[in-house]
Amino acid sequence: MIGPGSDMWGLPDEEEIISDYPLPRYFSGVLFPNKSVTPETQADEDDAALQSESLLTDENEEENTLENEETDIEETKDIGEKQEEVKVKRQDFNLDTNSFFPTNIGITVALDKSIKEIDVEFSFGLYTQAKAEERKIKISKAGYDSFFEQGIPYPLTFRDALKYQDGYMFLNRELKGEQKNPERANGEYGQFDEFKNRKNLIRQSEEGGPFSAYYHIGKLEKLLGRAWKRTPFTFKETISIEKSFKSPISFNFPTEIYKLTDAGYNIKVYEDNRARFVKIQLVNCSEDHPANRFSNRSENLNFKSLFQGSIKVQSDGLIEYKDNSLNTYASDDEIRDEEAEEIELIYRNIKSYGIGHNCSVVWNENTKTVQSTFLPEQNINDVINEFEDSSLDKALDMRNLSIWGLSKDEIKANLVDFVASYQQWINKQIQEKNKLNPNEKVVAERVIQRQEQNYKRLKDNISLLDNEKVFEAFQLANTAMLIQLIVSNDKRLGKTEKDLFEIDKSINANRLIYFEQYDTLENLGFVPKYRPFQLAFLLLSLDEIAQPEKRKANNTVDLIWFPTGGGKTEAYLAVAAFTIAFRRISNESDYGGTSVIMRYTLRLLTAQQFERASRLIATLEFMRSQSEFKDTLKEEPISIGLWVGQASTPNKVAGDNGAGILVSQMDEEALKGDKGNPERKNVFQISSCPWCGTKSVSKEKNSKGITIWRYGFKVNKGELKVSCINKQCHFHEKLPIQVVDENLYKNPPTLLFGTVDKFAMLAWQEEAHNFFKANTDNGLPPDLIIQDELHLLNGPLGSITALYESTIELLCTKNGIAPKIISSTATTRNTQYQIEKLYGNRKVNIFPPSGINHNDSFFSRESTESKRRYIGFMPTGKTSIDTQLQLLAHLFVSRLEVYRNKETKDFANNYWTIVSYYNSLKDVGKIFNKVGDEVSNFTSTLQYRLEDLFNPIDDYRFNFAGISSRTEELTSRVESSRIKSILKELELPFDEKNIVTTDKGYRYLNDVVDFVLATNMISVGIDISRLNLMLINGMPKNIAEYIQASSRVGRKTNGLVVSLLDPNRAREKSYFEHFINFHQAFYKCVEPLSITPFTESTIDKMLTTSLVAFVRNTYPNLNKDNDAANFKSAFAKAYRDFIEQRFGANNKEMMAYFERRFQNVVEDWESKARASNDLKYKRLLKRPSDKNESAIDWTVMQSMREIDTDTFIRIKSNFEWQ
C-alpha cells in the first residue's frame, strides 16, 4: 500500500513495473504537487473525462452522537454502552487540505550545538508509463509454452513478438492495433481478447477442463496492459545547519524526461539552551496542478507526484530530542502535579530522537541515524511474572498453601522469605535513588515511601496467620483457588464445553480426594502457582477482612494496577474466596446472605467474568458439601447470583418474559426432536456447567434412535432451578447459580454479581434490601465490594455512580463498619482523585506500587521479548474509509499467505479471524454494508494480482467468498443472549476441516468467524487467544481505551495491531508523527480521569433515586410498595448527614444547593404521605421515560446511564401539518 513491490512482475522492487496507475495503487507515502486554481476548460482531456473520480470525499463530517433513548433497564441492552460507543466528543479540529494532499514530509532532530553541517540522504520514486521494450514479467517456461498449446481453438496470433529468456517473458516489438477498452480494442489487441476468452481456454471435448494457458493468462494480460515503471532517485547532500533556508533547493533532474516534475529540500533551524533543532524537509517542487483535476487517473498528476519519499540523517552529533508535546500535563510548573513528576521519573530512560512531519520517524542509537517512515512499528515488551530467584517459587505454590500442603510454620517461613526479598529489592531502589539528581531524588523518595508502606502491611499481615481462624480461611481460599485452576485447565472438566456423548466417564471429581491426588504436572503440564503480585495482594488484604474494625479508622481502597492479561481477576477472586471462608468460620450464625459484591460496567465483561467467578463459587460449594468442611463452611449453600437487566436475564419467574415462559419455549423446541434446538431459547447466560464443562443444552439418542434433548433449566415452586445434565457431575441435582431477580431477593447469593446500572433498581424493588440486611439487626451486610475496570467509571457515568455510592455504602455499613473496597485496572491516572470522588475521600493504595524505573516493580518486570507489535498507517490522498477497505483486503490476503506457507500453516488459526475496532456505531454501520461487496471484491482483486503467491490452479476463493456470512459484531447492537454464543464461536479454531468442497469442486469455509466488527465493548474482559490480528480505525477518545482494546491481541502468541490514523484530524496525525515515541511508553500518556459527583446536574438527576433507595432498603416498614405512606422526614436524616460528611465539607455552596433540593423532596414526600394513607411507590416514582416538568423531583433512574440532557417536547392539540 506504500510500495514499491506491490506487483508480481518479478523485477527488483526499486525498479518495479505495476499494471495500474501508481496513485490508485499506493495509499501512503505520496507527495503531491501544489494546487493551482485553473478553469475547467484548460484541464487536460484525460482529467476532464475522469472528473468524477476525485480523491477527496467528505470524510471530515462531524461525528454524530446517537440519541440515548430513555427506557427501562429491563427493556434495554445497557443503553449506556451505546453512549460509551457512540458518544464521541469532537476532540480534533480538521487540518487544511495540505494534510490530505501533502506536498512535503519532514523530520526534526536535535543536534549538539557544535555541529555545523549534517549528511542527509533523500530518496523517492517517480513513475512513468513503461514502453514495450522495458516490460518483462517473470514466468515459468511451462507457463510461457502454455500460450502455444495445441488444440486451443483460437490460437495466439503474435507468437513472433512474444519471447522468453532467463525466466522472463517479454515483447520484442509493439503490438499492432489499439487497446482502449475491450469494446474498442482492435488489431492484435483485439485478437488477444478473443484468445483469452474463457470459452476459448476451456476444452469442449469430453474430458473437459481448462487448457494450461487458462492458469497463466493473467501474466500475459499484465504484459500487454497499461503499465507504469518506477525509477528510483537518491540524493546525498551535506547541508549547513547554521541557519534556515529561505526557500527549498531543487535537485538536478533530467528535464528532458521529467518535464513536469521537480523535487528539492528545505532546512529550518532553531535553538534553545540545550540543543540545535533542525527540521529537514523533502518537498515536491513540481509545477502546480489544477485543483479541480486531482484525480487518481490524471496522467500528469501521476507524473508530478513523488512516491515512497524518505529522509535519512546521520550525525555523531545527534542527541536526545526532548519532546514535551505528549506529556499528560501542561509544562507550566504551577500546574505540575506530583503524579506527573513521578511518571516523568519512572520513564526517564525512554528516549526519543526525532519527530515527523506528515510522516513518522525511526532511529538507531548505535549508528546515530534518524529516518522518516510511513510504516512505523513498535514492539511492546512482555511482562514477566516470575521471580528471578526460583527458590521463592515455593511460597507461590498453590498446593503448598492449601490444606494438602505445608504446615503453618513452613507456610509462614516461605511468606517471610517472600516479603523479605521485597525489602531487599526496595534497598536496591534506595541505592539507585541516591545516584539521581536532587530534583529526581525528591520524587523517587515518594515512590519508595509507598513501596515501604506496602512492605510493612505485607510483613504485618503474615503475623495474622497466627490466628487459627485466619489461617484456616487462608488455607481454604488457596485450596479453592487450586481446585478451580485445575477445573479451568483440564479439558476433561470445565476447560472445554462438551456434549453428553463427549463426557469422559472415567473422571470422578465428586470427592475431595480426587483433587488431593491430582497430578497437575502430568495432567496440565505445569505446577499451579500464584503470580507474585497475586499472592501479595491476597496477603495485603487479610487485615481489613479479618479485622473489620480496622475499616472504621483506615478504610483504604486497594487498587490492583497491572497490565491487561496479567492476572488481576485471579488476584481479587482469591480475596473473595478468603472473605467468604472467613465469614463462615468466624460466625456461628448470621454468616449467610451476600458476602461479596462484584460490579462491572459492560455486559460483555460481565458475561466473561461471571463464568470465571461461577467456577470459583462452584468450587467453594463443592468443598462445603464435603464432610471435611462441614463445621467450617456451615450449612447454607455458597452461591452466585447474576443481577443484570432483563435483556440479559429474567426479572421474574412468572409472567411475560419470565423464566417460566422461557423454559416452556425450550420445552417446545425439545419436542421437535432433530428439527428443534432449545439452545436458541437459552437466555440464562449459562452455556455449560462450570464444574464439568457439559453444555447446558445437549442432545442424545435413546434406544430407539430418537433424539432426546437435555437441558438444565426447570421451574419448580416459583424458582428457576439450574442443574448440570451430566448425571455423573457433582452438580447434577443443582448448580449454585441463580439468574432470576425474584429468586435472588428471596435467597441472596453469597456472591452478588452485576453491573453498576442494576443498582439503580434498588429504589424500585421492595425485596432488594435482603442483599444488605440493613433493615434488620440480624445478619451481616456484604464484607467486600469489588469494582473491576475502574477506569471505565469516569465522565458522566462515574459522576452519577459516585453520588449513588453514598447509598450503597450506607446500606453495607453496620455498627460503623463499612465494606472493604478493592478495584482493578490496567490503565490508571489521577486515581487518588477518582477514588476520593467515588468512595468518599478514601485513600487509594495502588498495588503493586511502581519502581523508580518503569520496567521493574519487583512483582513483575519487563521482558526483552514481545508478543504484540503495533504498526501505524496514515493515508495520503485517500479517505479513511477507502484506506480501511484496502487495509482489510491486505490483512485477509496476509492470513492466506500464512495458511498456504508450509512453514507457517500450523499458525494460521492464530491469525484467521480479523478484529476491526471502531470508535462509534456510526463507523460500524459504514463498514457493515461494505463487507459483502467492497471488502470481498478488494480481497479478490489483490489475491489475483499476487498470482505468484496464489496459483490459480489452487482454489483459494474461500478466503474472500462469503465473508459477510462469517462476520460477527461485538457492539451494543447485539442482543445480550447472543453475546456468549458469539464469544464461543470466536473460540472455534480454523483448520482444514473448515474448508468444505462441494460436488462441483468449489471450496468454501464453514464454522469459523472471519471478521469481527467491534466497539469499546471488546476493550475489557475478552481473553480469546486466537484473536491476534486487529485493525484500529482511528485513535479512540482516550489512551486507556486504546491500550485496553489493542491488548486483546498477543496474549499467548505473537499478535499484530494496525493503527489507521486520519491525517485530517490533528490529534491522530500527531500520534502518527510521534508513533515510536508514543508507543514505547504509552502507559505514560494515559489521560487523567474526570469525575464531578457533587454538581447541580448530578444532584438533580440522582438525589431522589439515591434517597429513595436508602430509605426503602434501610427501614423495615418502608420497603414494600404500599409503605411509601409511612415516610417521615426523620428517616432521611442519616442520608443527608452522610452526604454532608462525604461531599459538603469542602463545597459549602453546592451543599446549600443540595440542602434545598433535599428539603423539597423530603417535604413533598411527607406531604403526599399525610394526604394519602395508601400512597404507593408505583404512583410516587416516575420512570425517566414518563418524566415531565411537574414530576421532575420524582423522576427515579433505572440505570446509571440515563444522563441525557433535559428536553421536553409537547405536541400542541391544535397542531396542523403545514
Image: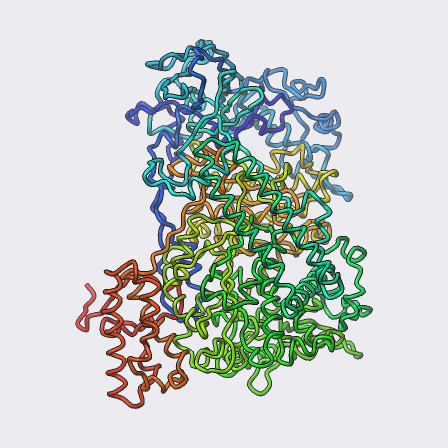
Which is nearer the eye, 452 or 1086?
452
Identify the residue shown where x is 70% and y is 49%: 392
Which is nearer the eye, 283 or 222?
283
Quarter the C terminus occupies: bottom left
Identify the residue shown where x is 76% and y is 68%: 503
* The residue positioned farthest toward the left in the image shown: 1214
Q: Is residue 561 above or below residue 57?
A: below
**Image quadrant in which you'd find residue 858:** top right
Total count of labels: 0
Q: Is residue 1177 visible?
A: yes
Q: Is residue 901 above or below residue 821?
A: above
Which is nearer the eye, 209 or 915?
915
Residue 501 pos. (x, y %):
76, 69
**Image quadrant in which you'd find residue 220:** top right
Residue 527 horizontal side relative to residue 841, left or right: right
Q: Is residue 890 visible?
A: no
Q: Is residue 722 above or below residue 239?
A: below
Residue 418 pos. (x, y %):
66, 51
Residue 421 horizontal side relative to residue 754, left or right: right
Residue 75 pos. (x, y %):
43, 71
Residue 718 pos. (x, y %):
55, 85
Task: Tell me which colouring the rendered structure shows.
Answer: rainbow
